[in-house]
Image: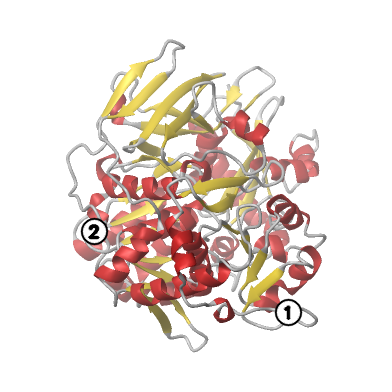
Amino acid sequence: MSVPVASWTPDPFATQFERADDGSLILRPLGKLAPTPVRLVDYLEHWARATPERVMVARRDASGAWREVSYAQMFERVQRVASGLLTRGLSAERPIVILSGNSIEHLTLGLSAMWAGIPYCPVSPAYSQVAGELAKLRYVLDLLTPGLVAAFDTPRFARAIGRVAPDVEIVGDAALEGRAVNSLESLEREVTPEALAAHANTHDDSIVRFLLTSGSTGNPKAVIITNRMCCANAAMLSQSMPFLVQEPPQLLDWLPWNHTFGGSHNLGLAMAYGGSLYIDDGKPTPAGMAETLRNLREIAPTVYFNVPKGFEMLATHLRDDADLRRKFYSRLRAYFFAGASLAQHTWDQLDAASLRERGERTPMLSGLGATETGPSVTFTTPAMGRSGVIGLPAAGALVKLARVAEKLEIRVRGAAVTPGYWRQPELTRMAFDEDGFYRLGDAVRLIDPSDPTQGLRFDGRIGEDFKLVNGSWVSVGPLRADLIGALSPLAQDVVIAGLDAEFVAIIVIPDLAACSGLLGLPGPLSFADVAGNPRVLAMLRDRLGTHARANPASTRCARRALLLPVAPSLDLGEITDKGSINQRAVLTHHAELVAQLYSSTPGDRVAVIDPECS
């Protein structure tokens, strides 16, 4: 197997635009998808033979030193663990479920399962840590019927294991009272001809894992991920961002592997192109950022992936810390964000840091995708880099823009698209249109309708949009992004209300650290402290008024706001472990706050602005 290496071309997203009979717009990439191997683990074998000593994955151990595993070491161990897994009668009907987060052990077990042809499912650790009855985790295990459950850092998962996996083999790294726990080492066996035959029988349509949707509008769905999807996505990445694979990529990454961004996109990029992935045990929170900064002072990424909140927190440190800035930009070819629009002020701060350090802007790339699409659908080029732009389809992604109400929904067909949801045929049927295009549920619009080659702009989630009582549609996604920028640095996020109301109102999720800093107080305040602070409310009212005066239309003008007085709940699905806010869940579970926003006597915790909206 050879790994393709390409150079950046002037137009990597040459696209043919066609109008279908039903009025939808078809975007057909002119470039063909590059040849791929049959299996994702074929990349592991290739690099184990080509660059056996290169670091594949690393993580800090208890002493703080980096524990590094080479490609050769990983490949040898994967075959031995896979041989042990094959003695257990595991299959798609009895897969492996991994409850714990990113770790070397997690990756070893996952790759071993892939090599053996046994699907596995990484589950958000938050599902096991919530208070209460663990209903979501119980639902997932009932859906998947696993034959083996793994939990490294095992004691953290003792309650979940005892309650929802009482009769399943457990693999972990510590003993549990009254329960047998097998170590990863105990799974290892000599690689037999039978094991080699089982591996050879895997193919491009073999299921490698199940990835769970967030379950924000109900119970999670188990998205089927195949070898074909993983390999197609790797090829799409190399053709869309070839300069990232002209040298082996080096990543420092915290993004969880139970999500498609970290587990499919980033992990796939690193392994497919012989890269080194350093696991970052930090994350973009006031407590977690210290660990991320510690790691960035030692590991220089060639491309840095994050969500907008992570870039926002990093930008301030890059501005103020010359040593960090020097290390961070020493090998960096590009940044890449996903999950939401990046606020313009954060973009400007990163540009300023890059110009200061290297005399030029570092490309900020983005795109659009979903768990069900492998995840890649569209990417931007450096020339397209601006907030809200999602670019054009990557090679291998045939895109349809279909009219839904007053918006254009983006839909896709291609090798990276899932065959469906595990054991849920009706949901699978509903996810695809009559022409076999997967419905992403995202709205887009042409940047320039007279010149489609300028690319696409994100236009919100179709299911989040609503009408005011006057019949005007509120486009939640773009308005949310604008308001976060307008309320910076007070707001971590905003939730937009107004269904069948006379005007738009918002619930603000405050950035506690930023609010503390603006007030000159040490350490983060609590949500309750911020919600009732008159100085914060005055700043909120001032910024909201400025935005309203510049956006007087009723669908753009937020006339009232209040601050969420409690942290968004993981248990209730209001926030994911990546920090994404679910609009519908917050509005549903805080109906009393919505009522307060629209009350004739809203009270002193509601910021009311004066301008009349048109």
Q: Secondary structure at mark 2?
A: helix
- Residue 342 shows in this picture: no
- Please tell me in which quadrant of the rendered image residue 298 appears: bottom left
In three-dimensional space, the C-alpha distance between marks 2 and 1, rounded to whole angstroms, equals: 56 Å
Contact between labelled residues 1 and 2, with CB atoms less than 8 Å apart:
no
Q: Residue 532: which numbered mark, if any? A: none
**Image point 69% across, 75% down: which residue?**
156
Residue 374 in the figure: left or right of residue 321: right
Q: Amino acid at mark 1?
A: Ala
Q: Which residue is mark 2?
A: 355
> In x, y percent, where is residue 126?
66, 62
Describe residue 387's horizontal placement relative to residue 260 as left or right.
Answer: left
Q: What mark, if any, has residue 180 been given in the picture?
A: 1
The foreground one among 289 and 155 is: 155
Q: Residue at x 17, y 49 (%)?
A: 7
Q: Residues within 10 Å of mark 1 (few under 14, many from 20)?
A: few
Q: Is residue 180 above or below residue 384?
A: below
Give the residue furthest to the top. 21
Element class at badge 1: loop
